[in-house]
């Protein structure tokens, strides 16, 4: 009985081992390479997979996720013979598990070495200043060069990023001095441009002020001229109205007598003023015949048209004022 129990236990253990060897569960985003009697047989995908124990063997296990690979720093020489220490990071992904297993003995080392050699080649074609400006070009060139060769290894290179570009200390000091000089130059240019713009603004302001003053003086002159014209017109209209009223008054009953009296008064007043302002007295020949003189003047007034009456009235007024 003991022998039977021992044999049963052995058979159970062998059955358990057989089941474990037969059933394999592959995780998501993984691929397992199976060899049968030392030869590639199949690639197991995620999920439950069955293999033949002791005949089939899980030879390689690969992750299909994106893998970051740190590329060690190295010294590159630029086109202008300047040493530059460069390091970066490479992102790749296994796309063919069979080629990744048998295409290269160590695809990670192969990718790393290819990235370094391609980087030295690209940097060697550029001057130092361009290496800082053309990072995208460097990254794209390295990815294209590696991806073409890595296709035989079942690897897809996704991107390459430069982490650091470190020139020698002497170059760093020279670059800092150049940057400082450029900044001082831009500051001086900006200051001169500011002064130039200031002078332009002042000149424009003075020109606009002069134009505004001339426009104001022009408008003031126009206003004065219009005011004088309006005043002259008003005076002329008033004078015309006065003449019309005088003419109407003369034509009315009793107007002629009033004119006779006014002419006589002005006549006498004029001789009185002459006596005050001059040592010599001028006496007309017919001073005694005053009524005859006034009658003659009135006869002249009656025989003239209305416009002549108005002129006579103005002359009489002027004589009275003098």
Image (cartoon, grey):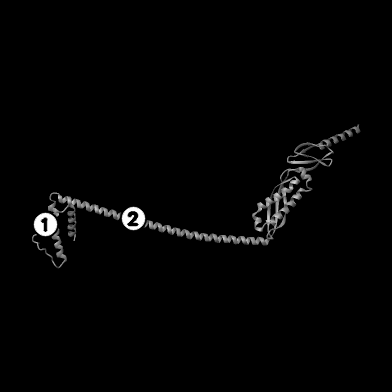
Horizontally, residue 315 falls left or right of residue 291, namely right
Residue at image location 65% in from the left, 55% down from the top = 132
Residue at image location 22% in from the left, 52% down from the top = 240
Q: Which mark is residue 222?
A: 2
Horizontally, residue 38 falls left or right of residue 130, namely right
Q: Which quadrant would residue 177 be assigned to in this image?
A: bottom right
- In the rendered view, would you say 35 is above or below 291? above
Which residue occupies the foreground of this view, 314 or 73? 314
In the picture, the quarter occupied by the N terminus is top right
Q: Nearer the viewer, mark 1 or mark 2?
A: 1
Residue that lies at the very extreme toward the left in this rendered image: 288
Q: Which quadrant would residue 294 be assigned to in this image?
A: bottom left
Give the image location of residue 276, x and y in percent.
Answer: 15, 65
Residue at image location 66% in from the left, 52% down from the top = 137
Which residue occupies the foreground of this view, 274 or 222? 222
Q: Residues within 10 Å of mark 2 (few under 14, many from 20)?
A: few
Q: Residues within 10 Å of mark 1 (few under 14, many from 20)?
A: few
Residue that lies at the very extreme toward the top in this rendered image: 1
Give the image location of residue 230, x and y in percent.
Answer: 28, 53
Give the image location of residue 147, x and y in percent.
Answer: 72, 48
Check whether the beta carbons of the residues at disc 1 and disc 2 lie within 8 A of each other: no
Report which residue position mark 1 lands on. Answer: 296
In the picture, the quarter occupied by the C terminus is bottom left
């Amino acid at each position: 009985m003991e022998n039977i129990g021992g044999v049963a236990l052995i058979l159970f253990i062998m059955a358990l081992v057989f089941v474990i060897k037969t059933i394999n569960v592959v995780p998501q985003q993984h691929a397992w390479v199976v060899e049968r009697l030392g030869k590639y047989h199949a690639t197991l995908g995620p999920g439950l997979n069955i293999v033949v124990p002791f005949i089939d063997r899980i030879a390689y296990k690969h992750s299909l996720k994106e893998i970051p690979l740190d590329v060690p720093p190295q010294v590159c020489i630029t086109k202008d013979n300047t040493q530059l220490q460069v390091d970066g990071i490479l992102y790749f992904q296994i796309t063919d598990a069979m080629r990744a297993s048998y295409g290269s003995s160590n695809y990670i080392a192969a990718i790393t070495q290819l990235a370094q050699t391609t980087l030295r080649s690209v940097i060697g074609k550029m001057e130092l200043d361009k290496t800082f400006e053309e990072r995208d070009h460097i990254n794209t060139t390295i990815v294209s060069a590696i991806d073409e060769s890595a296709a035989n290894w079942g690897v897809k290179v996704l991107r390459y990023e430069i982490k650091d570009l470190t020139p020698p200390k002497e170059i760093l000091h020279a670059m800092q001095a150049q940057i400082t000089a450029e900044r001082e130059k831009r500051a001086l240019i900006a200051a001169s441009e500011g002064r130039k713009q200031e002078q332009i603004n002042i000149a424009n302001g003075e020109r606009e002020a002069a134009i505004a003053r001339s426009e104001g003086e022009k408008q003031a002159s126009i206003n004065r001229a219009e005011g004088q014209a309006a005043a002259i017109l008003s005076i002329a209209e008033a004078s015309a109205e006065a003449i019309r009223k005088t003419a109407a008054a003369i034509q009315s009953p009793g107007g002629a007598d009033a004119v006779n009296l006014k002419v006589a008064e002005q006549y006498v007043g004029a001789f009185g003023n002459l006596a005050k302002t001059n040592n010599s007295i001028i006496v007309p020949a017919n001073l005694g015949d005053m009524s005859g003189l006034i009658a003659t003047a009135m006869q002249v007034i009656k025989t003239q048209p209305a416009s002549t009456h108005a002129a006579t009235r103005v002359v009489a007024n002027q004589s009275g004022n003098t």
